Amino acid sequence: MKTKSGYVAIIGKPNVGKSTLMNSILGEKISIVTNKPQTTRKRVLGILSDEKYQIIFLDTPGILDPNYLLQKKFMEYVQNSVNNADVLVVLVDVVNDKDGRNTLEDKIVKQILDKQKKPKILILNKIDKSNEEIVNRLVEKFEKLNYFQKIIPISALLKFSVPEVVNAIVELLPIGPKYYPDDQLTDEHERFFVSEIIREKIFEIYKEEIPFSTEVLIEEFSENEGRKDFISASIVVERETQKPIIIGKKGEAIKRVGKYAREAIEVLLGRPVFLELRVKVRPKWRSDERLLNSFGYNDNE
């Protein structure tokens, strides 16, 4: 029996629901999700396998015009994912982009749509928060462009019409062998997901610039038979003034991060852990090539 397989890049502006869509399709939380933009910073790979096909999803950072080096790294992940994909899935948020202009007038999005000749599917997301008139108007507008093989209105959060997205992708995939074992969901390791969980809790708890100025490094990860696993992580900030904000009055803020992160990590790993959090200051790390490389922002294959 011939199988279909290939890579599918999920792209779109920040906060349109790319990670929510991938998680909904896989039925597992592979990418962290918050209500803040720029939550996803690296390419996150998720694998959906069936007897007849294998889809390798590439969840990417939101498309933006970069202002500093870290954001340039975001766009490198996006471009490399697009280049490596067999199918492109483009997301539009029908609530915040009611006429499609935010998407269509973005020079980077337009460049991808113009230059990439590979199959494209347009997803109109968050229809549960919109109305039929707006959705129909968007469908009609995007159909006239002839960019897309399929346009599908969905709610990734409620999993409405998500199976239709999978079916549309499978139709466009090339015939080929599977790249991964059927029971594999991702190519990432536990350390990556632990650091992402901690970063997710930072995004949820802190306001304004703090989440965007932080990075999480796993310093130690020890599995202890008969005892709790030990995880030591550093929360990196850019300025000395941000350190007391992360820690909070009498350490209350960082304790909250630790509590919520530890609970989520224990669910992920299926075993108890002891989580130790520290705060380090690395001035202007978001614009420092050496530091970004040491933080893992150098794997753009």
Image (cartoon, rainbow, N blue to C red):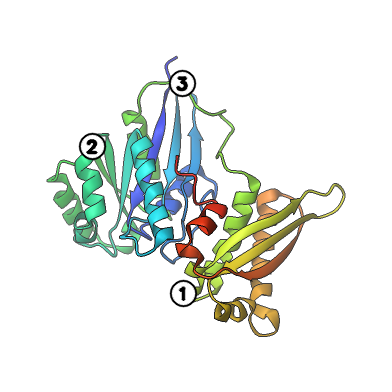
Query: Measured along the vertical axis of the image, is residue 115 above or below residue 124?
Result: above
Whichever of callouts 3 and 2 sits on the residue coming sooner in the sequence is 2
Alpha carbon separation for disc pair 3 and 2: 24 Å
Q: Which residue is mark 2?
A: 149
* Local secondary structure at mark 1: loop
Q: Residues within 10 Å of mark 3 (few under 14, many from 20)?
A: some
- Residue closest to the eye, 1 or 239: 239
At horizontal 35% and vertical 29% (from top left) the residue drawn is 173
Residue 47 in the figure: left or right of residue 98: right
- Residue closest to the eye, 95 or 74: 74
At horizontal 57% and vertical 68% (from top left) the residue drawn is 282
- Residue closest to the eye, 233 or 67: 67
Alpha carbon separation for disc pair 2 and 1: 39 Å
* Residue 206 screen position, x and y as percent: 53, 74
**Quadrant assignment, res 281:** bottom right
Q: Which residue is mark 1?
A: 209
Q: Mark 3 or 1, which is nearer the eye?
A: 1
In the picture, the disc for residue 257 is none
Task: Say if residue 61 shows up in the picture.
Answer: no
In the picture, the disc for residue 177 is 3
Whichever of callouts 2 and 1 sits on the residue coming sooner in the sequence is 2
